[in-house]
Image: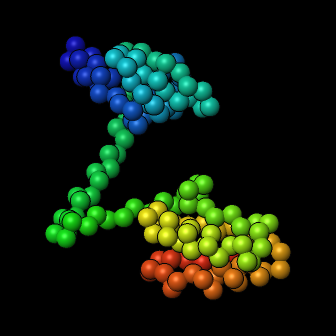
Amino acid sequence: AAAAAAAAVGREEAEAGDSVIVRRLGEEPVLVESRKGKQLTVAYGGLTMKVKAAEVARVIKAERVVPPPKAAGRKGGKRERRVTAVRVPSNTLDLRGKRLNEVGDDVAHALDRAMDLGCLYIITGRGTGQMRRFVRERLPGGPPGARVGGGA
């Protein structure tokens, strides 16, 4: 009776991210995606299945990652700026099909915007390379970690 009670407690502890062994699915552990009451949603191969908590034979707890403590902020009131590392329309300047004399103001405006966003993608296209050289000449030295890469 004590073993059955211990097994029931183990089933109740299964949370999203844990792995469980369900006898009718075999001896391989399956990942728990979510839990609603006494029903678990598990990933079995490429399928998602709903399983009753009572069907769980064993729970294998996932290792929980504790986030590091936040560093004490500076007294100056400045917050740390987050860098947007994903290319989206707001941080992208597309110069394909434009002429050199048309893009001077566009590059300056985009660089100003990049100071707020933390990241800027400039698409120059293929051509002769004049546009790429023109843009690189106008880029400031930049903060540490800034990089200029050739596109594919």
22 left or right of 37 in image: right
> Number of callouts in the render?
0
The residue shown at (56%, 60%) is 91
* Quadrant placement of the C terminus: bottom right
- Is residue 5 visible in the rendered image? The answer is yes
- Outermost residue, right side: 127
Residue visible at 71% across and 67% down in the picture = 95
Q: For this view, does 17 lie left or right of residue 150? A: left
Q: Position of residue 86 (x, y in %)?
A: 55, 57
Q: Return the residue nearer the eye: 99 or 90.
A: 99
**Image quarter of the N terminus:** top left
Q: How is the image coloured?
A: rainbow
- Quarter of the image for residue 128 reads bottom right
**Is residue 152 among what the camera can see?**
no
| Residue placed most toward the observer, 19 or 112 | 112
Q: Residue at x 45, y 69 (%)?
A: 115
The image shows residue 133 at horizontal and vertical percentages of 70, 84
**x 48%, y 81%: residue:** 142
Where residue 116 sits in the image (x, y, percent)?
A: 43, 64
In the figure, is residue 141 to the left or right of 57?
right
Image: 82 above or below 134: above
